[in-house]
Image (cartoon, rainbow, N blue to C red):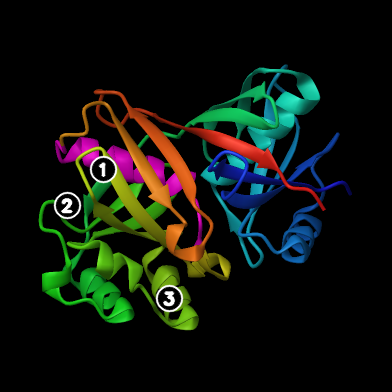
């Protein structure tokens, strides 16, 4: 099985979040996809095959320890792979629970890619979930930014959003992987989005992904889409778009851009560059 390795949301020809991509005539059995994802070892591997709909692609995403319903950075990597194989274009994708598109356009040694997320929604985090999350990371109430209240945000998967009042608090993030996995399993979370708003339109994030057996993701398109949808819900002064810097504390600088349409609950466009990883 040919597995492409592509870093999505790269900082030009460096950084980004590595994803595996498999493009096949038909999707392998789920157990085989799970085994391949575990062997690849990246936070997610995307598997794609032509769908019954003409021109569409059936896609499933696997982390090393579980299947996930949607993964942004692996979708960007898939868009890059499809552009290289099929030529530049917009590719309809059929996910387990949604239909989306990804666009890929070649530009020298990198590929520019953009996805349209599933619809978004958000709800306030329960006091119990907030208390558990604060205890997991050791944050006090004073560490949180009251302008962005804790919430569960959705754009194809659920993510807990915790906004921090300082960049130092974000940089100091630490937690126990097994405790994080247990919390995310109980709450049905795919990741936790820790965010610091440098300005209204430039945000820094970190994304613990213990539910998939990964301590932290260096770039998370699904979480960025969910965050952008939540900021729209609370009338954050985003001006129609946000830029997200992620992975900096991991030494894997990644850059994500989200365009936010005014319609409540509508899809978020998340874009960036992808670079092919050489063996």
The residue tagged with tag 2: helix, strand or loop?
A: loop
* Residue 266 in picture, x, y percent from top left: 34, 28
Q: Nearer the viewer, residue 120 or 222?
A: 222
Estimate the spatial distance between the alpha carbons at disc 3 and disc 1, rounded to whole Å: 22 Å
User: Badges 2 and 3: C-beta atoms under 8 Å apart?
Assistant: no
On the picture, is 244 further left or further right than 219? Answer: left
Q: Sequence order check: which comes first, mark 2 or mark 3?
A: 2
Question: Which labelled disc corresponds to residue 113?
Answer: none
Question: Does the magenta segment cover residue 225?
Answer: yes
* Residue 67 in picture, x, y percent from top left: 62, 57
User: Badges 1 and 2: C-beta atoms under 8 Å apart?
Assistant: yes
Residue at image mark 2: 148
On the picture, is 11 further left or further right than 185? Answer: right
Residue at image position (81%, 58%) is: 32
* Residue 54 in picture, x, y percent from top left: 72, 17
Residue at image mark 1: 230
Is 240 rendered above or below residue 133? above
Residue at image position (62%, 41%) is: 13
Question: Which labelled disc corresponds to residue 180?
Answer: 3
Q: Nearer the viewer, mark 1 or mark 2?
A: 2
The residue tagged with tag 3: helix, strand or loop?
A: helix
Q: Which residues are magenta?
A: 217-236
Q: Residues within 10 Å of mark 3 (few under 14, many from 20)?
A: many
The number of numbered discs placed on residues in the rendered structure image is 3
- The quarter holding residue 258 reads top left
Is 29 rendered above or below residue 35? above
Most common secondary structure along the magenta stretch = helix
* Residue 155 in picture, x, y percent from top left: 40, 42
Question: Does the magenta segment cover residue 137?
Answer: no
């Amino acid at each position: 099985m040919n597995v492409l390795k592509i870093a999505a949301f790269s900082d030009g020809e460096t950084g980004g979040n590595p994803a595996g991509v498999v493009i096949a005539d038909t999707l392998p059995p789920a157990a085989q996809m799970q085994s391949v994802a575990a062997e690849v070892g990246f936070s997610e591997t995307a598997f794609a095959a032509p769908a019954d709909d003409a021109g569409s692609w059936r896609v499933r995403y696997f982390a090393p320890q579980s299947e996930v319903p949607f993964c942004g950075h692996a979708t960007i990597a898939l868009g890059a792979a499809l552009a290289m194989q099929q030529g530049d274009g917009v590719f309809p994708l059929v996910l387990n629970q949604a239909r989306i598109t990804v666009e890929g356009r070649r530009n020298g040694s990198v590929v520019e890619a953009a996805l349209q997320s599933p619809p978004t929604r958000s709800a306030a985090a329960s006091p119990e979930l907030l208390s558990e999350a604060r205890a997991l990371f050791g944050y006090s109430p004073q560490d949180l930014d009251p302008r962005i209240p804790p919430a569960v945000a959705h754009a194809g998967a659920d993510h807990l959003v915790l906004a921090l009042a300082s960049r130092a608090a974000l940089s100091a993030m630490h937690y126990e992987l097994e405790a994080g996995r247990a919390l995310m399993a109980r709450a049905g979370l795919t990741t936790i989005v820790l965010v610091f708003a440098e300005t209204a339109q430039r945000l820094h994030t970190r994304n613990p992904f213990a539910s998939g057996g990964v301590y932290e993701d260096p770039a998370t398109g699904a979480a960025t889409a969910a965050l952008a949808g939540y900021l729209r819900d609370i009338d954050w002064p985003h001006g129609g778009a946000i830029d997200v810097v992620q992975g900096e504390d991991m030494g894997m600088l990644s850059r994500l851009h989200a365009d936010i349409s005014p319609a409540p609950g509508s899809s978020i466009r998340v874009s960036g560059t992808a670079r092919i990883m050489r063996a």
